[in-house]
Amino acid sequence: MSDAMTGFCFDHAFVINLDHRTDRWAKMADNLARVGIVAERFSAISVRDLIDDQPTMALKDFLKRVDGPSPSAEHKLQTTWACMRSHLAIIRMARDAGWPSVLILEDDCEFESYTPAVLNRACEQLQGREWGVLYLGGTLKKGGKKAAVSSNLLAVSRIRLAHAYVVNASLYERILREAPGSGLPLDWYYSEILQASSNALMVRPTLAYQRLFDMSDIEQVERQPKYKTRQMLQRCWARIRYGRTSY
């Protein structure tokens, strides 16, 4: 394990990145270096790789119910399935290697400057505690819950997005078995099925956000800022409290 990662609650980290998105990998590499996280690039499974591995009809029906008729429906179905396959490939690799946990990042992830200070604290507070998945960022959906279990850890349910999370070895087999047949995109499977019975936790304050003004490969829209006063104040306070750390 790299000296930069000493004290973190994972020994292995991967960034899912399509081969042609060299721009995203460059941004990720720079951001990770700034916060002391050492991660390998994982060549993402693309739609072209799905010739013998097609999405389930259940997933197709789900996206149709959620999004309605759309000329881009087939593209979203294929890319959603390819995205899941990339995540599962990393989890399968972690299982086969016997790793205690693994950090999975998507290449549109961006870490706050105070990540090292907060993550070290959160990982210390994780010691001796049962947990299955640890979110470094995500969105609380309606009906979800957050409850403090320590100063930097929240017990959570219905957290959506899968751009930055750590999976404990105790969940590898379950995720690999359940996710493909769930009929849901991976982050929905996590939020609607897995989290309720897996001791899901989230780091407080949030460390990782999806990069703004970046075109989503799945949604095919550019993420725009949503100005939420409470969230902005929380981020400002965290920057003051934990300061900036560079490596």
Image (cartoon, rainbow, N blue to C red):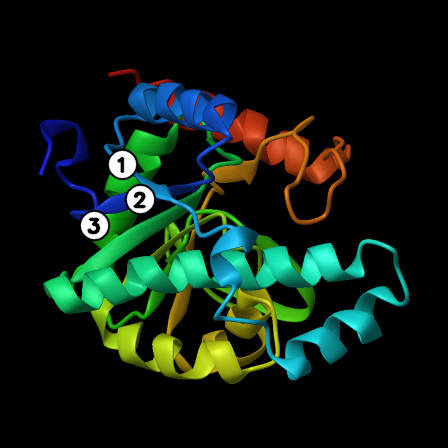
Quadrant containing the C terminus is top left
Q: CA distance from mark 3 to mark 2?
A: 11 Å
Q: Which residue is mark 3?
A: 10
Label 1 amino acid? Ala
| Image location (x, y in percent) of residue 5 | 17, 35
Which residue is tagged 2? 14
Which of the pair 202/95 is nearer the observer? 95
Image quadrant in which you'd find residue 135: bottom left
Density class for disc 1 (Cα within 10 Å; few <14, some 14-19, many ≥20) is: some
Where does residue 204 sit, x and y in percent of width and height?
A: 44, 47
Furthest-front residue in this view? 51
Numbered tag placed on residue 163 in the rendering = none
Q: Which residue is mark 1?
A: 39
Residue 244 placed where, x, y %? 37, 18
In the foreground, 27 or 245:
27
Q: Tell me how far mark 1 sits from mark 2, CA to CA.
A: 5 Å
Viewer-nearest residue: 3 or 162: 162
The amino acid beneath tag 3 is Phe
Question: Mark 2 falls on what kind of element?
Answer: strand
**For mark 3, does the 10 Å Cα neighbourhood hold few (<14), some (14 to 19), or many (20 or more) residues?**
some
**Residue at image x 77%, y 32%?**
227
Most extreme residue toward the right is 69
